[in-house]
Amino acid sequence: AIFPHGLSSSQMEALASTEVEEPLLSISADTEGLTSKLEVPGAPEGATHLLVYSVIGDKARMQDPPAAVAVEDRAIPTVLPRGLIFEDADPGAGVYGGYAKLKRAGDEASLTHYLIYWGGSETEKLP
């Protein structure tokens, strides 16, 4: 067996006996481009990254550190702000200034922040 450089014999034994847990995705090394679609219904509590390890047969070769990428959930919020109040206090023509007062969503547990854009109507966001 081939092991990463600098491991002790006990670390090498532990790696050699490491069983591969159920992965999110298994990609064969002979797959064209090594690209495959990943769709999972949820992540374990505290998950922030996807990690990839090399495997030979049923034994994982756990390099330290593994190749990794941070992931960010792109879920669409299901709770909405209850409103926005703004009154232009700037006397200049075509210049807007004043305080925007947001009426918070009822449950902000899943939200990180709010974004305010210019709109062409009550539903059309302008670029």
Image (cartoon, rainbow, N blue to C red):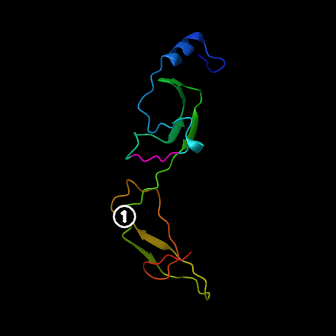
Q: Is residue 66 magenta?
A: no
Outermost residue to the bottom: 93
Q: Main secondary structure of the magenta part?
A: loop
Q: Quadrant of the C terminus?
A: bottom right
Q: Is residue 77 above or below residue 33?
A: below
Q: Report the residue at 66% width, 17% height from top.
A: 6
Classify 10 Å Cα crowding around label 1: few (below 14), some (14-19), many (20 and above): some
Q: Report the residue at 50% width, 70% height from top.
A: 116
Q: Secondary structure at mark 1?
A: loop
Amino acid type, residue under disc 1 in the picture: Ala
Outermost residue to the top: 9
Residue 115 placement (x, y as % from top left):
50, 66
Q: Report the residue at 52% width, 82% height from top.
A: 88
Q: Quadrant of residue 23?
A: top left
User: Magenta span covers which residues?
Assistant: 36-40
Q: Is residue 71 left or right of residue 64?
A: left
**Residue holding disc 1:** 105
Q: Quadrant of residue 32?
A: top right
Residue 82 placement (x, y as % from top left):
36, 70
Q: Nearer the viewer, residue 49 or 4?
A: 4
Q: Is residue 22 above or below residue 38?
A: above
Q: Nearer the viewer, residue 83 or 91?
A: 83
Outermost residue to the right: 5
